[in-house]
Amino acid sequence: MAFTVAIDGPAAAGKGTVSRAVAAHFGLAHLDTGLLYRATGRRTLDGTDPVEAAKSLRAEDLEADDLRTPEVAQAASRVAAIPDVRGALVDFQRAFARRAGGAVLDGRDIGTVICPEAEVKLFVTATDDVRAIRRFRELAANGHDVDYDAVLSDLRGRDARDSARADAPLRPAEDAVVLDTSEMDIEEAVKTAIAVVDSKRS
Ligand code: C5P
């Protein structure tokens, strides 16, 4: 039976960690839709047309080891504002969302555009500073040479672009449960998200 959990929110709010944990807990498949935009954005860095890049995305493009860099994140956010890029990625995401056995998808527009009929919608957020500290630590732990102010300005720039675009802007669905993780550690955020999903399953 199809059962979709849509998890949206701004950059580095913790939605990736929450999504993976929710998927593992309930035995659901998980799709990080940001990776589709990152892989598309990355291909444009060597001159590929963004719409062509989105249309011809291959599974191995999602495995490139530099998809998490700030440069690729910015390229992702730029291509994500192009309606034909978004259009090229819709069918894959919708099919994934309705697969038998259920799925968790995280992104920016899952509850609003990709899967408005999702059984559970969460909007995971946190203050700019908390998100920047988390992303800074994650990048530093992975060996990137990063500067806190640059990370903060990268997040703010992407959020502004993601929220202002005309097509599928970043915003909570009207029926989403908002989970502010600013004052939560990861265990608490995961526990709260699992409780929300449980409450919608019965
Ligand atoms: O989630 P992540 O930070 O990896 O996403 C990278 C970028 O991809 C976002 O800043 C956003 O511009 C775009 N994106 C999107 N819609 C999604 C997922 C990601 O526009 N569903």
Image (cartoon, helix red, strand yellow):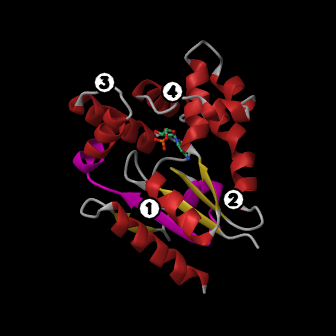
x and y percent of residue 94 in the render? 71, 54
**Which SS class for mark 4?**
loop
Q: Is residue 160 left or right of residue 114?
A: left
Magenta residues span 110-132
**Which SS class for mark 3?**
loop
Q: Is residue 99 above or below residue 67?
A: below
* Mark earlier in primary sequence (3, 2): 2
Contact (CB < 8 A) between labels 2 and 1?
Answer: no
Per the image, the residue denoted by label 3 is 145
Q: Is residue 117 magenta?
A: yes
Q: Is mark 1 within 8 Å of ligand 1?
A: no
Alpha-carbon span between mark 4 and mark 3: 14 Å
Contact (CB < 8 A) between labels 3 and 1?
Answer: no
Per the image, the residue denoted by label 2 is 97
Q: Is mark 2 within 8 Å of ligand 1?
A: no
* Mark earlier in primary sequence (3, 1): 1
Kindly identify the residue that appears in the image at 66 percent across and 30 percent down: 61
Alpha-carbon span between mark 3 and mark 1: 30 Å
What mark, if any, has residue 135 been given in the picture?
none
Alpha-carbon span between mark 4 and mark 1: 27 Å
Q: Which image quarter holds the C terminus? A: bottom right
Q: Is residue 186 left or right of residue 101?
A: left
Q: Nearer the viewer, mark 3 or mark 2?
A: 3
**Which SS class for mark 1?**
strand
Q: Is residue 72 left or right of residue 201?
A: left
**Which SS class for mark 2?**
helix
Per the image, the residue denoted by label 1 is 123
Kindly identify the residue that appears in the image at 34 percent across and 69 percent down: 188
